[in-house]
Amino acid sequence: MQIEFNLNGQTVSAEVEPRTTLADCIRNNFGQTGTHLACEHGVCGACTVLVNGEAVRSCLLLAVQVQGDKVVTVEGLSGDELTPLQAAFRKHHALQCGFCTPGFITTAHALLSHEPDANEERIRDVLSGNLCRCSGYIPIVEAVLEARSSYRDSGSK
Amino acid sequence: MKPPIFEYASPSTVAEAVSLLASRNGNAKVISGGQSLMPMLAFRLAAPELLVDIKHLKDLGAIRIGEDGVRLGAKVRWCDIERDARLTVSHPLLAEAIKHVAHYQIRNRGTVGGSVAHADPSAEMPGIAMTCDARMTIVGSAGTRVEAAADFFTGPLQTSLEPDEILTEVHLPAWPVSRRWAFLEFARRKGDFAMAGVALYYDLDGGRIVNAHVGAIGVADRPIRLTEVEAVLNGNKMSDKLIATASAKARQSVDPPTDIHAPGAYRAALIATLLGRGLKKSAA
Amino acid sequence: MKVFNSYIGRPMERVEDLRLVRGRGTYVADVNRPNQLYAVILRSSTAHGIIKSIDSSEALALPGVHRVLTAKDLGSKVPVIPLRLQPLPQLETFHQPVLADKKVRYVGEPVAVVIAESAALAEDALEHIALEIEPLPAVATREQAEGKRSLVFEEHGSNVAITWKAFRGNVDEAFKTADYVRREKFRVQRHAAMFMEPRGFVAEWDEAAGKLTVWGAAKTPWHNRRTLAAQLGLPLEAVDLVEVDVGGGFGSRGEFYPEDYLIPAAARIVGRPVKWNEDRREHMMTANHAREMECDVEFACTRDGRFIGLRGQIWCDIGAYIRTNGSVGPRNIAQYMCGPYCMEHIDLKSSMLTTNKTPCGTYRGPGRYETDFVRERMIDLAAQDLKIDRLELRRRNLVADSQMPYPLPSITPYDSSTELDSGDYHAVFDRCLKEFGWEERSKLRGRLIDGYYHGLAIGSFIEGGAAGPKEEVRLVLETDGALSVYMGSSSVGQGLETIMAQIAADAMEMSYDKITIRHGSTSYVKDGYGAYHSRSTVMGGSAILVGAEKLKELIRKTAAERFGCKPEEVVIDGEQAGFGGNHLSFAGLSETPLEVEAEFFNKKYTWSYGTQAAHVAVDPGTGHVKVIDVTSVEDVGRMINPLTLHGQAIGSMVQGLGGAFLEHLVYDDEGQLLTGSFADYLLPSATDFPSVRSVTLELKPCPNNPLGAKGAGEGGLIPIGGLMANAVADALSHLNVQPMELPLSPPRIWQLVEKAEAARAKA
């Protein structure tokens, strides 16, 4: 099937099988490999992307389901300089192997864009849908807490 | 874990959707939020020929609150329920139960209709539907029908839905403001399926419990009502003794299966504990 | 050797993060080669059986399917996976063939390789391969293993592969006269490293150049290259293993698995690059399992609480084959059960039982986690029996600083001995009590608050590191004055690129920004060793120091030729070589890069050590345990980067908590793995253990390497099992609940409470 959607600010199109997940489409059709697959059954959150501004598990979406939608991946949230959220991750050592990190970045970005005043409990709650095996989560929570100020100052980034 | 091959359609009307389902002789499946169906496809536990996506069906995404209660369209998502402030008054039991469903990303996609049609015996929404005598509106080739929850859930991951039928609405009866209620579940981690959970409500008439509804998830092959417990409660005033009696009755009246997460005896004891705590909470 | 502390010891932000935090890392699933095909592995769904036939004809007829490889395609003798550690000849029987040949021995064992145009098509093809297996009775429990009904290896005559023995002193005599002996049985559940990035390989055979390149290496690339080259009959130089970004290892990823052979072999056979990515369901039944053990142990003390020794039998369920390092855990359980305590008399036998389950290997703190559970539980039980305070009992027996180096028990066969190198165990113990707030929290012990009973526990641990024999580096001073460091060390996510740059910067007295660490390709150095047993900092770091001295010599020699003086007259300072008022910058010092190779050898393990304390609250109704606080204090000798070290400490502790409460790979009696996904295998999430603290000290440097550092990074989880079990026992002491088995799942706690209440009612 032919699909067309907005990926990280650009209109993209591809011919895909209906069974192709959004995750595989992003990675293989469009070469955006920042979105990672760690379970492919909707538990670990490493594949989290934003669809129309909402955080979703891209392994649980078919590419054909995002026809006409706006999809943003970790690449779409990154520039030449680290964003305040990314700088906070680095500062707090919120990543070790880095495999789960893009999923945390997109999820945290979605959360703070909608709730820049989220408290620690809310942050932990939301992040409980993303698995990390290296960090023990504490530095990730610290990083997201610190990043809040940048979302308060100028809205979503 | 790539899904098996299937076709995909996203019709614009319910009639079209029903027609597509009917055309495949039981080999087509509805996809709503996909949060339960996609893992099944990834594990190749399901291999439908055709997925019928209901994303374009109008009017199925609304939460309607009126004198006759709360009507949840099949496409209502968990995040929609979370954000609808009216529900804390119009159906606090629903609002509380849904807080326990899954995780952030799933809550942006998972739907009432999908969850109820999937009928996981440990899931919250089927539990609420069962507890509250929900009525399901179902549309198929033969027309529209309304079914009571008690008849809708027929077995483990089984419902009375025919292959050509779509669940379009879950209707929870009106909720009096003075109603007493509680929802408690115990899960290994936040967002996990409950090891067991209890949803209960009752009204008070002259200080005595009437209209007790006690539902349980995670203790049988489908969400159930603990009717024997309800019988213990009805007509009586709440007291520690009544709570103890009701809890003991709860433990006796279930026979949960044993699985890798817990022996049946644990779940039976757990439902009794949760019931006791829930009754205490409801009376506070 | 002068080693300045301008970078070493600083919590420098990691250079790796710049790409990883933007999703610009390259993990093996991100590697693509032109014209590549995709492999998917057909795996046995029978735990034990004889392969009768494999018919791939239907699969081959499917569009997009190129080949289906089975054992018969791999030559007259199917290659087997040799042992990397403790490679005793009598263990050869248990080597795993890269594809099941006559028998299948575990659910998940590779039987065939499907190669197709896409992973999805290859997966479709699996369903069309007719695999006929005549089932044999499965060996899935210790009783079944010890019975003779079914043998995993008929030729061996039993399911006991080997028994290791740890020994010291004269146990039988000592136990005869001991005031106090307590005997108990313990069990630890099967669980696993469960790193987040599933394994994968991309292999490419360049026929013209006769060169094989394999992406996806980790942990021990040089060893794996030797193994692979030998199996394929290729010279070493024809094979290059490339390590890209690696999503965690924890001792499990990077060992040689069947796919390490199968994917390169497939690439050679089909003549096109082949890409393979494991999925999570596969991972659960293929990546090394760990930790499953039972034991029956006696602990002897004097009446006034001096530890005398340990005697007993340990059984380790190691699965269907002995993997590359499958003996390490079982040996460590026996050899290190004494931990940081003086115990003169040790007689512990550790038997490895073959079963029809996934083979086992090392997982962070192998054997150490299990053995500390046993020992610390025994200590608390002894404290109860002897009516001696738990803290005091430990203090009385911790090895003292004055006793260092303190020999640990020996182990045989494949004899090895080691000794604790340095440490002030008592100081760290006391520091832990202080950081944790033991005195204040003690007031809550046994109290019921809001439906929860509160309890505390403490435990001390040792962590071995820096396994030898050596590590290699190659330092290259580029013509622009930058320094490239090629290492034999491997990255598994631990921040190698940053930490080694810190060490190199100090050793060369250079700016950190001029240093690039390159790791993980076998073309980088001749003979690297890799990342295991917490060795990279000590071994790789020390090799860098050796290399820096050699490079400085070469710089002096080169500068001397230009100055016209003797090399010893040249002074190196601030990235310049100077003589008699003249200076030559490192940049442009030579027309070609200056290159040295260096090695660091080591025979002595380092021993980090520490103490942890925990505060839990238990709900007897649900069996839920809330971890209110767990605090670790560890002395690592010398910290290179406190930021990354702290990160590993916390991460390790949370892994330990997962093992203590949540994680369990469950098999039924037929050898079927029932835990097949993340829905059933429960990993800690952000809400489970919010209160984990760690303090790292540099009290006693290691005397055996120029950095003074000790391997660290595994220690956090080592005491957790015993600690949590003791804390639960403390919380429920009014019922005398005694957990003897992990995990401390809610149903298990509930059952212990029910049993204890029933016993109390009877009494």
Image (spheres, coloured by chain):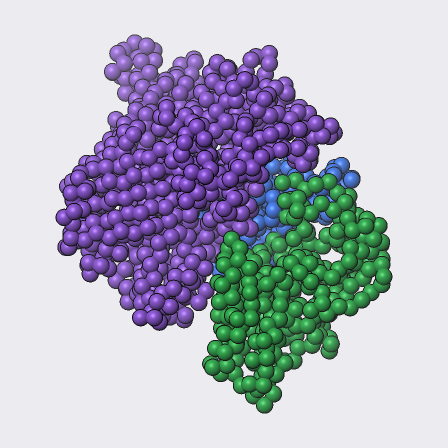
What is the x, y in percent for residue C594? 39, 16
Q: Residue at x 15, y 55 (%)?
A: C303
Quarter of the image for residue C26 reads top right
Q: Residue at x 22, y 33 (%)?
A: C703
Q: Residue at x 25, y 62 (%)?
A: C439
What is the x, y in percent for residue B258? 53, 58
C61 over A56 or under it: above or below: above
Q: Colour of chain B?
A: green
B18 over C409 or under it: above or below: below
Q: Residue at x 20, y 49 (%)?
A: C300
Q: Colour of chain C?
A: purple
Quadrant in which the N terminus of chain B appears: top right
What is the x, y in percent for residue C500? 38, 31
What is the x, y in percent for residue B111? 68, 59
Q: Is residue C688 left or right of residue C417?
A: right
Q: Is residue C274 left or right of residue B186?
A: right
Residue C20 visible somewhere in the drawing: no
Residue C603 visible somewhere in the drawing: yes
C222 over C607 or under it: above or below: above
Q: Which chain is blue?
A: A
